[in-house]
Image: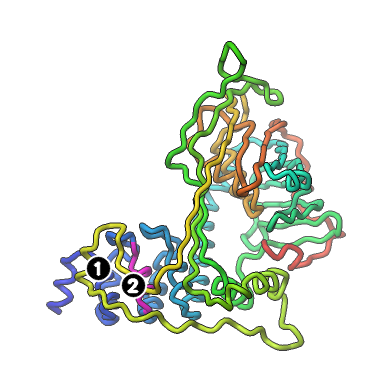
Amino acid sequence: MPMIMAQENEEYPLHRCIFQGDVKTLKILIGTHDIAEKDKQGNTPLHLAVMLGRKACVQLLLTHGAPVKVKNLAGWSPLAEAISYGDRITISSLVRKLKQQAREQMEERRPNLVAALHQMGDFYMELKWDFQSWVPLVSRVLPSDICKIHKSGASIRMDTTLVDFNDMRWERGDISFIFNGDQKPSHSLTVLDNKAKLFQRVRYEETELEIEDEVDILMSSDIMVAQMSTKSITFSRAQTGWIFREDKREMVGAFHADFYQINGMVLESRKRREHLSEEDLQKNKAIMESLTKGSSQGFKNGEPPVRRASLNPPPKSNITWDEYVVAPPGQCPLLGRNLVYKESSKSFKATVAMSPDFPLTVDMLLNVLEVITPFKHLSKLRQFVLMKLPPGFPVKIDIPILPTVTAKITFQEFAFRNDIDPELFQVPSDYFEDPMRFPDL
C-alpha cells in the first residue's frame, strides 16, 4: 500500500506502472486516474503499453476505454506504434476499439446534428466540382461533377456522378446518397446506384473478416500520416488590375463575393516502414491490390486467407523509468524498433471567395457535410471549411485534394424551398439490395 500511495502523489502513475510492467498496481489505479493523460512526450498510457509490448496492460486499458485516436508529440497514434511493434493481436484489438469509439462519438453527436438539421430551413443546393492538375496528361482525364443536394427536415439527399477516386482512377456513375436522421443508425445511411437499380445500407459495424483484412493491410503497408497544416495559414485580399490594383470582387452566381488568397497552406506527409522487410517492400503493391480488389468478400477456393503473422518483438529497451520521465519534450528515448522514417511537405496555392449574401451559414454547411463525408472529396471540403475563414460564406473554393490535383468548388445555386418531395429520401420499390456494391462505405 505505501507504494500505491507514493505513486498517487507522483507524476504519471499509470505510465510508471506500465513502464515497470506492474499490472497489479495498474488495476488498482486505473479507476481513479486519467486514462487519457499525456506525459511530457505526449504519450498516453496506451502509447507506452504498445511501444513496450505490455500486452496485458494494453487489453486492460482498452477495456477501460483508453482513447485510440490520439497522437503524441511526434504525431503518432497508439495504432501506429502497434504496427511498428508488430503484434497482430494488439493491432486487431486497437482497430476494433478505434472503430467502436468512432461509432460512439458519432452517436453522441447525432442528436445535436439531427436537431440542427430540423431547425435549418429546407433547401436545394448545387455544388459544381472542376478537377484540375498541373500534370498535362492527368488534367485531360479529370472529371467535372455537379452535386445536387436536397434537404428536408433531418433528411439529406445528394445526387452525384462522381462516386470516388483511388490512385488516380475516377469512378463515375449515377449515385444518390441518402441520410435519414430520424431513422435508427443501421438504416440512416443508404447509397443508391441508379443505373443498376441497387442500394446499399452503409453498415454500422465491420465483420470480423473485414477487420482481419484491414489488419493485414496495416501490417503490410507503410505507416502513413498526411495532413494539411493550418498553423501558418493567413488570408490576404486577392488583387485585380494591371496598373491600378484593387481588391478583387466578383459575382459568383447570384452572390457578391470578395476573393482571398490563402497563404501558407502546406501538405505534410510522414511515413515509417521499420516493420517491413525487403520482401515486404517488393510484395507490398501486389498485396495491397489483391486486398483492395475484394479479398474481403470471401475465401478463395474454400481456403481461408493466409494472415500476416506477428513480427518478432524489437530488442528490449534498456531505458529506465527515471531516464524516460526526465527526457526533454520531443526527445523521447527509443522504446521500440529503430525508426525508418521519411517526411515531406509541399506548399499549395489556394483561393476562396467569401460572400456575405449567401443564405446558408458556415455552421449549417458543416452539418450538411458531416452527413455526406463518406465520399473522400467531400471529406476534404469539410476539412477546408473547418479552417478559420474570412467573414461570409465560401461560395467558391480552389483547394488541393491530392498532391497533383486541385478542386475548384462553386456553390452555384441555392434556394430555401418548402416543396421538396419526401419520396426523394426513400429507396425506390424496384431497387434491390446489394450489401457489397460500395465496399469502401
- Image quadrant assignment for residue 33: bottom left
Report the span colored magenta.
Answer: 43-53
Q: Residue at x 37, y 60 (%)?
A: 72
Q: Position of residue 261 (x, y in %)?
A: 55, 30
The residue closer to the viewer here, 342 or 365, is 342
State how far apart marks 2 and 1 are (Cα): 9 Å
Residue 404 in view in this figure: yes
User: Of helix, strand and loop, which one carries label 2?
Assistant: loop
Label disc, if present, on residue 335 of the rendered structure: 2
The residue closer to the viewer here, 250 or 337, is 337
Q: What type is the residue that disc 1 sits on?
A: Tyr
Count the numbered circles shown. 2
The residue closer to the viewer here, 177 or 438, is 438
Q: What type is the residue that disc 2 sits on?
A: Leu
Tell me whether the residue at label 2 lies in contact with that at label 1, contact meaning CB atoms closer than 8 angstroms.
yes
Figure check: 220 above or below 239:
below
Is residue 331 on the magenta stretch?
no
Figure check: 24 above or below 418:
below
For disc 1, the neighbor class at 10 Å (few under 14, some 14 to 19, many from 20) is some
Q: Position of residue 120 (x, y in %)?
A: 60, 37
Q: Residue furthest left?
A: 2
Q: How does the figure colour the protein chain or chains?
A: rainbow
In this image, 332 relative to 287: left or right? left
Q: Position of residue 91 (x, y in %)?
A: 49, 75
